[in-house]
Image (cartoon, helix red, strand yellow):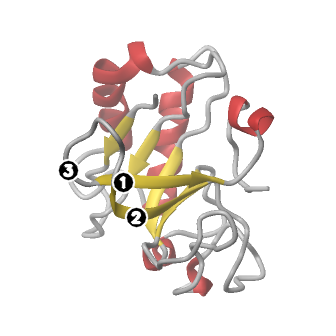
Amino acid sequence: MGAYHFAHPDVNCPSAEANHFWNVAGAYTLAEGKSLSPAIDFEIFNGTACQPGYTAWANAFNTAVKAKTSSSLNCQIIISTCSGCNFNSNITLGPWVLNYNGQNLFTGSPWTTCCTCNVWDSTHKCGSTVWNYWGVSSTGAISGVSGNCDLDAFNGNLSFLKSSQGVGGI
């Protein structure tokens, strides 16, 4: 399990969003090696409140959430490949990249479009292996769940998953 937050960077300061997130999900945000790192979903790009840009806003949110934990849990940032262009290489959150490109989750890559927007990989190459999670489908099926489900892949081994899940992929 992992806690999720939908960002409203154009309306609220990151500290206010982090406080709201923590008040709702803090009890479920555990660093026990079984829960996923907190995730913040960025889909709104209409400006930022209290910060000079999206990278600073996301980093401030991450810092505020980390200050509330007894560990160094690093938030993951959920973005589409092209939305990565709104950030720069100073981003401290690990990449959870959405790209329903039809590639095999074991052999493919989310970085098939907007490759120059991969600010986590200085080479900006298509097919990059620098990502922590990849949203591969929004129309998956899981036994016992009615309707479509998101399907995601993790890019790493069990020890990396149990760690703070920092930036970088494996």
Q: Circle 3 — which element?
A: loop
Please name the residue shown 53% across and 47% down the image. Answer: 76
Q: Are marks 2 and 3 in contact (CB under 8 Å)?
A: no
| Residue under label 2 | 137
Q: Quadrant of residue 115?
A: bottom right
Mark-to-mark CA distance, 1 and 3: 10 Å
Instruction: Depth check: give the residue in front, 13 or 109.
Output: 109
Image location (x, y in percent) of residue 118: 61, 75
Image location (x, y in percent) of residue 24: 28, 22
Q: Amino acid at mark 2?
A: Ser
Q: Earlier in the sequence, mark 2 or mark 1?
A: 2
Q: Are marks 2 and 1 in contact (CB under 8 Å)?
A: yes
In the displayed structure image, the side of residue 39 where residue 109 appears, left or right: right
The circle drawn on residue 12 is none
Instruction: Kindly report which numbered mark, 1 or 3, lies closer to the viewer in this rendering.
Output: 3
Does residue 170 lie above or below 128 as drawn? above
- Circle 2 Cα neighbour tier, 10 Å, few/some/many (<14 / 14–19 / ≥20): many
| Residue under label 1 | 150
Please name the residue shown 67% across and 63% down the image. Answer: 106
Q: Circle 1 — which element?
A: strand
Instruction: Depth check: give the residue in front, 169 or 104.
Output: 104
Instruction: Depth check: give the residue in front, 31 or 14.
Output: 31
Instruction: Depth check: give the residue in front, 75 or 46.
Output: 75
Please name the residue shown 47% across and 51% down the image. Answer: 58
| Residue under label 3 | 147
